Image (tube, helix red, strand yellow):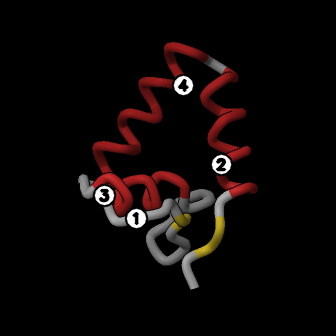
Amino acid sequence: MNGRFVINQPKAKVMGVAAGLADWLGVDVLAVRLGLIVATLITGPVAILLYILTGWLATDER
């Protein structure tokens, strides 16, 4: 882990949450994105809501 969580806009596809989470965990961004897809299929709108809230509340990498 690299300290605190920040979203990663340069590697972003939507909001940068998955890229920031991958940087924070030290794993490949594809694994995080696939995990988010699976979480969305299992929990439905809960995962989408958490993704959006994380994108709004997390700080940008500047």
Residue at (46, 61) in percent of width and height = 20
**Do residues under tags 3 and 4 come within 8 Å of each other at their CB atoms?**
no
- Sequence-first disc among 3 and 4: 3
On residue 54, which mark appears?
2
Which residue was labeled with disc 4? 40
Front in this rendered view, residue 18 or 3: 3
The residue positioned farthest toward the bottom in the image shown = 62
Distance, label 3 to label 4, CA atoms, is 24 Å
The location of residue 60, given as percent across then percent down, is 62, 73
Labels 4, 1: front one: 1
Q: Nearer the viewer, residue 23 or 2?
A: 2
The Cα atoms of the two marked residues, 4 and 1, are separated by 26 Å
Residue 31 lies, with reference to residue 10, above or below; the image says: above
Distance between the Cα atoms at labels 2 and 1?
Answer: 17 Å
Type of amino acid under label 4: Thr
Residue at figure coordinates x 57%, y 15% from the top left: 43
Q: Mark 3 Cα within 10 Å, few/some/many (few <14, many 20+)? A: few
Q: Label 3 is placed on what type of residue? A: Met
Q: Earlier in the sequence, mark 4 or mark 1?
A: 1
**Please, what secondary structure does the residue beneath circle 3 have?**
loop
Disc with the residue nearer the chain's start (2 vs 4): 4
**Residue at x 73%, y 55% (from the top left corner):** 57
Q: Split into 4 quadrants, where in the image is the N terminus?
A: bottom left
- Quarter placement of the C terminus: bottom right
Choose the circle earlier in sequence order: 2 or 1. Answer: 1
Q: CA distance from mark 2 to mark 4?
A: 15 Å
Q: Is label 1 in a helix, a strand or a loop?
A: loop
Residues at discs 1 and 3 in contact (Cβ within 8 Å): yes
Q: Which residue corresponds to mark 3?
A: 1
Quadrant for residue 22, please give it: bottom left
Nearer the observer: mark 3 or 4; the answer is 3
Q: Do labels 2 and 1 touch, CB within 8 Å?
A: no
